[in-house]
Image (spheres, grey):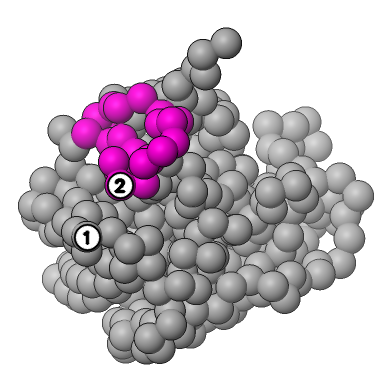
Amino acid sequence: MVLMSKPALEQFSFIRNRKPTTFFSGIPLIDLSKPDSKHLLVEACEEFGFFKVINHGVPMEFISKLESEAVNFFSLPLSEKEKVGPPSPFGYGNKSIGQNGDVGWVEYLLLNTNQESISQRFSSVFGDNPEKFRCALNDYVSAVKKMACEILEMMADGLKLQQRNVFSKLLMDEQSDSVFRLNHYPPCPEIEALTDQNMIGFGEHTDPQIISLLRSNNTSGLQISLSDGSWISVPPDQNSFFVNVGDSLQVMTNGRFKSVRHRVLTNSMKARVSMIYFGGPPLCEKIAPLPSLIKGKESLYKEFTWFEYKRSAYSSRLADNRLVLFERIAAS
């Protein structure tokens, strides 16, 4: 990514009134090795839709290997990276996010978690040993998927659901529509000096899937929105994972769990690399509030398939409230 003229910058978004980053100290911290975690998970999902986990069981070796592979890929010349782009939907993307005009100061690699999908198209870019990347990806995704399922089962326990795997079985299904994303946010000191504003790396949005597990290097930038609409900066932690409630989980809990709105600001001096696993259900899966969570209450959402919601979400802009189209209209 190169420095652009001021007119060229107009396609990007900025945060006005630039201030020094103040980190929020109240992010829920969940120790997955402790028995009271299931209750803390429920509280975190109800209040924030977001939390940090430690003692997560993902070997640091898996994390560092994949991060190294990601850094190597993003360090390649643009002409090499573009051999696996544009994303359709999988592949390499640069600045453009989705098909509807959203842009950010980011380049990324979007992959299906099905290992067979990492085809010749990708293999040609990863040097003499594409298996090294494939193995690093497989080890990491397998471990993170396992953690995601454990977290979802602890959530079910915390909600006192009889079927402990009611959420996790959707990720374990062979037809699970889960995806994996590597993001690289280059530093942009010249641009931020030119504008005296924070540049948006990835615009505000919620994740449409069930759950997202994010790990990034020790560079700040992630922000989440609180229930009052204010934005807070999340302190980076390269040894932990951050977990987002997705739209589908909000629906399945009938709005009890909150799908968290989040965004990424660029860091003027340091590159940020993030790795995100998005746990999704099979395309034909019907998504609706669980009957045991609407006893004595009205269902807030219509039933829909993941395919229907995904199609709607991917035809919208990042910042749109995608769930509003699937809410039940209260009788007047």
Residue drawn 62% across the image and 50% down it: 263
Residue at the far top: name it: 332
Q: Position of residue 299 (x, y in %)?
A: 40, 31
Is residue 320 rendered to the left or right of residue 73?
A: right
Q: Which mark is residue 71?
A: none
Q: Position of residue 29 (x, y in %)?
A: 55, 78
Whether residues under marks 2 and 1 lie with C-beta atoms below 8 angstroms apart, the answer is yes
Q: Is residue 302 magenta?
A: yes
Q: Nearer the viewer, residue 61 or 271?
A: 61
Residue drawn 33% across the image and 32% down it: 310
Q: Nearer the viewer, residue 175 or 65?
A: 175
Is residue 225 rendered to the left or right of residue 325?
A: right
Q: Position of residue 235 (x, y in %)?
A: 66, 74
Residue type at mark 2: give it.
Ser
Is residue 324 rendered to the left or right of residue 66?
A: right
Q: Quadrant of residue 5?
A: top right
* First in sequence: mark 2 vs mark 1: 1
User: Which region shows up in magenta?
Assistant: 286-307
> In the displayed structure, would residue 141 be above or below residue 30?
above
Residue type at mark 1: give it.
Gln
> In the displayed structure, would residue 19 be above or below residue 218?
above
Q: Is residue 72 magenta?
A: no
Q: Nearer the viewer, residue 31 or 127?
A: 31
Q: Secondary structure at mark 1?
A: loop
Q: Nearer the viewer, residue 230 or 120?
A: 230
Q: Position of residue 261 (x, y in %)?
A: 59, 47
Q: Label 1, on which residue?
A: 162
Q: Secondary structure at mark 2?
A: helix
Residue 118 in view (yes/no): no
Question: Is the residue marked by circle 2 packed among few (<14), some (14-19), or many (20+) residues within 10 Å?
Answer: few
Residue drawn 38% across the image and 67% down it: 158
Q: Label 2, on which residue?
A: 292
